[in-house]
Image (tube, grey):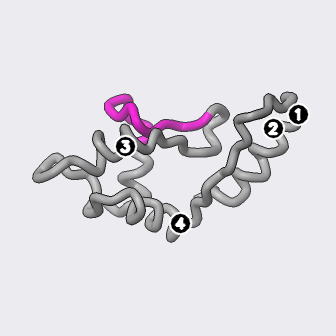
Amino acid sequence: LCFPQKLWLMVESERFQSIWWSEGGKCVAINEELFKEEVLGREGPLRVFAMQKMKSFIRQLNFYGFTKVQRDFGRSPSLPEFLAEEAAASAHSKV
């Protein structure tokens, strides 16, 4: 399988706790430390991706058009503000 197919299957699977759809299903959320251990740390026949470093994984995401969404966790936006930010971010990450 190619990278986007593997990524899709991982996000859809309940076997991986380190990667999931964000609320609304428009973004992929990743717990970086757990992802390094759970996915990138696999070896042999259990290996999912050829890369073992987060930097390489992020490079692949960028290659396929994904972008990092910066969130300001210091404030709690109103629902309309949150939805507007989510819509703007998701416009850049559609595959």
Q: Is residue 59 left or right of residue 43?
A: right
The residue tagged 4 is 62
SS for tag 3? helix
- How many angstroms separate mark 1 from mark 4 (CA)? 28 Å
- Which tag, 2 or 4, sits closer to the chain's start? 4
Q: Element under label 1?
A: helix
Is the residue under label 3 in contact with that under label 2 (CB below 8 Å)?
Answer: no
Check if mark 2's residue and mark 1's residue have beta carbons within 8 Å.
yes
Give the tally of numbered discs. Answer: 4
- Answer with mark 1 or mark 4, whichever residue precedes in sequence: 4
Between the residue at mark 2 and the residue at mark 1, the CA separation in whole angstroms equals 5 Å
> Would you place residue 6 above or below residue 11 in this image?
below
Q: Counting residues from the N terminus, which is met first, the one under dot 2 or under dot 3?
A: 3
Gap between marks 1 and 3, in whole Å?
A: 31 Å
Expressed as whole percent of the image width and height from the top left, the position of residue 75 reads 79, 32
Q: Amino acid at mark 1?
A: Pro
Return the mark for residue 83.
Answer: 2
Magenta-drawn segment: 10-22
Residue at the far bottom in the pictured view: 63
Residue 47 spot, x, y in % from top left? 20, 51
Quarter containing the C terminus: bottom right
Q: Which residue is mark 1?
A: 80
Which of the marked residues, 4 or 3, is nearer the chain's N terminus? 3
Q: Quadrant of the N terminus?
A: bottom left
Closer to the eye: label 4 or 3: 3
Q: Is residue 93 above or below residue 33?
A: below
Q: Amino acid at mark 3?
A: Phe
The image shows residue 70 at horizontal and vertical percentages of 68, 50
Identify the mark at residue 35; answer none if there is no mark.
3
